[in-house]
Image (spheres, rainbow, N blue to C red):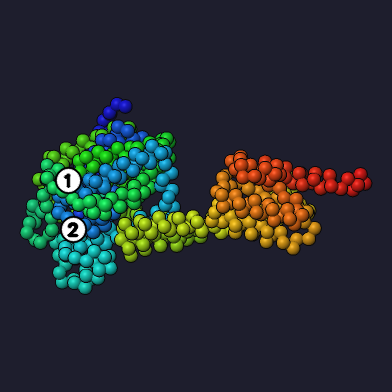
Amino acid sequence: MKLNWRDVVAGVSIAGLMLPEAIAYSGIAGLPAQHAIVAAVAGCTVYALVGQSRFAVISPTSSSAAILAAMLLTLQVTPQQKALLVAVVVLLVGALFLLASALRLGALSSVISRPVLRGFAFGLAILIVIKQLPSLFGVAVPGAAPLDILRQIALAPGVWSLPSLVIGAAALAALLCLRRYPAVPASLFVILAGIAVSFLWPAHGVALVGPIDLAAIWVGPFTVSADDVAQAARVAPPLVLILFAESWGTVRNLSLRHGEEVDPNRELRALGLANVASAALQGMPVGAGFSAGAASEAAGPQSRLASAAAAAGLAAFSLAASAWFAFIPEAVLAAIIVVALLHALDPKPIIRLFRLGRDPYLALSAACGVLAFGVLNGMLVAIALSFAAFVRRLSSPHVMHLGRLGGSHDFVDVGRHPDAREIPGVVILRPAQPLFFGNAELICAEILRQITDRDGLKGVIVSLEESLEMDTTALDALLELDAALKRRGLDIRYARMHDGVRDLLARAGGADLVARSSFSVDDAVAAIAQEGASRCPISSNRM
């Protein structure tokens, strides 16, 4: 790869967004801004070397910052110990990413379903925006719960700071107006304007960010207890899940739009190395955020070297202007965070779920879980909801009754296709879910129920195309079903049985069952017809 001027311009534009976002996200996490800045520099540099997408920006994200904040609130430690514990967590996150890459667990993001992830992101965005309101109104709110913050602000208008409100409202208006020009580093311009206002309009009770000491990354010596490390380490798995779900979603969407090919396992490795590098500098967790990715796409980078240019630009901005950062009004940072989260506050994805009639309550439950139980517990609620929805769907027995479509070899659900014809004397059934321990006995019972009291029934065909493999519970249930149908004197056949299932049945003593299986439903129908003809030779001769 060769660095060209378009990558440099794109990198500077990206750095203009990364700087205020880094300061803002460190505020969400409750850490000094330098920990987010060095994390962004490390993340972008490493990704330029080992990543794939030219649009991805690896830096701290709002969701990971919120999870980190939830963890830090539970610890009674000094600021130096807090920074060390964050480094331990980030190192564990990097190690888990690298382990997942080595095990080729690229489908890790599928652990959380998209509706649940959308609901989680929606609830998280609401939570973060509510927590920015004290800075916008210029009031101190000790309560951390969202309802407490809203109640205390609403009931005390007399303590609102008019200068903070004016500055915050002006910053919001400017950012919203500049959104129509995506290539413009609006956040950087707003920060510079905020600093200018602080110089021109001092001592009016406007809270400022305060000094940022880039040299004060590693300080010590100090120690932390094993209990604190264990308590901090428990947030590493949720961080990995949310970072990869958000990062892979961002990278995949951008790559699909621009014809790039990306490998999820390689992205896991890149995220792992980026977080290890961030931990070495005592930085925050890093991933590919939605807003930074969108800004990068608008800037038009030509290669991954734009990420390296963004890291260099961010480092240069920080070193040249770190003394000025102390004069950034907190209301300006709050406005930047609110505008950066507008994409996550868009209700259209959840409205679409209601329109489709699929999973809307999963999304709303995940959003309410974040608001009611906090970020970390809300994440666990989201994971539990995903698994509950998965198990519920697989465990609900649904057995389709198949018929032949016209004169073809195709067999379809007669409930959906009224023109499909049943085979006389034969019932063809297909479980809609793969057989596993949670549904095998229920599905086999449903199959028995559907053939009960059918007059003139001679044969049964069970199509197993949905079951790529089986556990021992499903295996035993299938063998018991086969024995029960044979006791009723029925010719029982199986269709579309996968090779792995055939091998398993053969090892379990079901060779006879395997011998009665066909690779298609049409072949199974023909086998039953042939068996019936062989049992009635006289009838055949009369024909």
Q: Is residue 266 left or right of residue 536?
A: left
Closer to the N terminus: mark 1 or mark 2?
1
Q: Report the front residue among 124 and 400.
A: 400
Residue mark closest to the camera, 1 vs 2? 2
Q: Quadrant of residue 156?
A: bottom left
Q: CA distance from mark 1 to mark 2?
A: 22 Å
Residue at position x 15%, y 71% in the image: 158
Q: Secondary structure at mark 1?
A: helix
Amino acid, disc 2: Gln
Q: Residue furthest left?
A: 203
Q: Position of residue 154 (x, y in %)?
A: 23, 71
Q: Report the front residue among 266 and 361.
A: 266
Q: Residues within 10 Å of mark 1 (few under 14, many from 20)?
A: many
Amino acid, disc 1: Gln
Up the image or down, 478 lies above or below 269; here it is below
Label drawn at residue 34: 1
* Residue with the mark numbered 2: 76
Q: Position of residue 535 (x, y in %)?
A: 84, 47
Q: Is residue 532 left or right of residue 290?
A: right
Q: Position of residue 17 (x, y in %)?
A: 24, 45
Label drawn at residue 242: none
Q: Residue furthest top?
A: 2
Q: Is residue 185 left or right of residue 199?
A: right
Q: Report the front residue among 380 and 316.
A: 380
Is residue 420 visible from the viewing direction of this image?
A: no
Q: Position of residue 253 (x, y in %)?
A: 40, 43
Residue at position x 42%, y 38% in the image: 104
Residue at position x 58%, y 41% in the image: 500
In what quadrant of the picture does the N terminus appear?
top left
Q: Secondary structure at mark 2?
A: loop
Residue at position x 31%, y 58% in the image: 375
